Image (cartoon, rainbow, N blue to C red):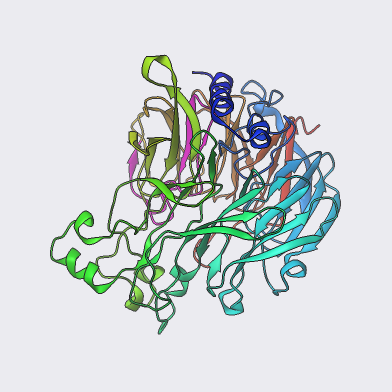
Amino acid sequence: MRWRPAIAAIVALVLGVSTAPAEAAVSAEPYGSPLDWRMGGHDYLNTKSNPFERRIRPGNADRLAVKWTFTAAGDTSAIPAVVDGAVYVPDWGGTFSKLDAATGKVIWQRKVSDWNGIPGSIVRASPAYAGGRLYFGDQNSPSGGKGTHLMAVDAASGDLIWKTTLDEHFAAVLTGSPVVFGGVVYQGVSSKEAAVAGLPGYPCCTFRGSVNAVDAATGRVLWKTYTVPDNGGKPGGFSGGGVWSTSPVIDVVNRTVIVGSGQNLTVPLSVTQCQTAGGTPEQCLPDDNHIDQLLALDLRTGAIRWTAGDKAFDAWTVACEPGFPPENCPPNHGGDFDFGEGGHLFTIPGEYGRPRLVVGAGQKSGEYWLVDARTGKTVWKTQVGPGGVHGGIEWGSATDGRRIYVSNANTNHVAHTLPDGTVTTNGIFFALDAVTGRILWERADPSNAETMGAVTTANGVMFAGSMSGHMYALDGATGKILWDFLGEGSSNAGPAIVNGTLYWGNGYNNRFIQGKGSKTFYAFSIGGR
């Protein structure tokens, strides 16, 4: 199966069923300009793949060299947006920068606090570019008590156009990236309450994850769908289900937006008693407790069309980890096996040779799922290395339609034996056959570290990073390491790949994931030219 025919098939399906001419015109070009990377997942299909890249290839990736660097105000863990010769970079120092893609020179720079009025506020996730505007969400200190906000900024000037509060919970954050389609911004909401639960005496927990549709022109919330049942804003009920994945998928054929959800933070006592008595998840959990699932929601109404993933007990907070007061660790706690990505939309051969639209997504349990895009029915699932609290499969995989490229962080440091007999207890890179789910190759991180960051791909090359600081290019067909660059800090971001240049953030270090910080943002090209 080849990628361009797959895209053509999707576009043909889209144009065959769409009744909105404006949206059909947009949908027919899911990638925008060949010289752009407009959002975290690159496109509406969230492939994290640039099918138009031709300059970087397996035969010359070993010649990648630094083209320029930019000094940010802090770590960069977002895949940048690259549009019309400009690079848009948020950092953990609370600054958002627009750079010249050719030189790295600053075009404009703003503090996030200048837009939302909250000192110390940051943008940690990729912005989405549409119609001359940038859309992104903020992350604020829980002590700020200001909730979390989606913002629209003029891409030319950096001026704020609107700001909308998506959740007033003091610990709410927008960890994932938005996607813009048909004049609507789709954004998931997550929280830091799983971490706050580690504080002694904290009354855990009340946050509920949600998916939001927002008018791109005005910032008006069109609909909001929660992932777990109502708890009345009081502890003791269902909480959690954060939607923190990279970018949602837009399925224009079935008119859905597809996201992944996280674990419960708490469940009612009745559920705990049912589980302790030997009840199954099907017996103990209600149907509207949508944790650790892929969810397809109606683009217009937010109604949940289907869910995918195993129904499981998975209530967890950081209080379950060694070294934290255990009072807020739920009884019978789970493994924190979120779907850390919204998935990828592509086609495989279906009945009578017709293209079948499918969604693939990885889970922190280490499982990779392929499901039917119309029904959510499982096509196949493959165990791709060990699971772990931070992965397993954490920030996302990538696909070129032929292969699915996966990074397994292996943060629980489980011994994993590779096909050649070597054993690793650290991160592993994989490629799967997109049609069958068969593992094609696997490669241990040569630097023996965790590999949590999103991966990206273009022209037969997979790009991935390591918490050790190494940034790799791998041959997509074989897994051979083609290029290895040691960055200044930990690498927990994938690069945007545009017109022969990799735009790659660097640095990741916080209380819960201890890496090495860095303020250096890199641009790489063949020979550094």
Q: Is residue 193 visible?
A: yes
Q: Residue at the location (34% across, 59% down)?
A: 289
For this orientation, the residue located farthest to the front is 19
Please tell me which residue lies in front, 133 or 387. 133
x and y percent of residue 65 in the render?
A: 73, 35
Q: Is residue 397 magenta?
A: yes
- Residue most extreme to the left: 277
Q: Please indicate whether residue 381 sits to the left or right of residue 78 in the image.
A: left
Instruction: Please tell me which residue is depicted at 46% across the width and 60% down the height of the picture.
Output: 242
In the picture, residue 212 is in which quadrant?
bottom right
- The image shows residue 411, relative to residue 164, as above or below, that is above
What number of labels is visible?
Answer: 0
Q: Nearer the viewer, residue 213 or 125?
A: 213
Q: Position of residue 474 (x, y in %)?
A: 55, 31
| Residue 44 within the segment the image draws in magenta | no
Is residue 72 something that shows in the picture? Answer: no
Residue 125 horizontal/vertical position (percent)? 62, 54
Image location (x, y in percent) of residue 327:
33, 78
Q: Is 51 located above or below residue 521 in the figure?
A: above
Dominant secondary structure, magenta: loop
429 displayed left or right of 174: left
355 versus 150 height, above or below: above
User: Among all residues in the image, which is located at the extreme top?
Assistant: 352
Residue drawn at 42 percent across, 50 percent down: 304
State the extent of the magenta-drawn residues as a range: 388-417
For this view, does 139 lie left or right of residue 153?
Answer: left
The quadrant in which the C terminus is found is top right
* 323 and 285: which is toward the camera: 285
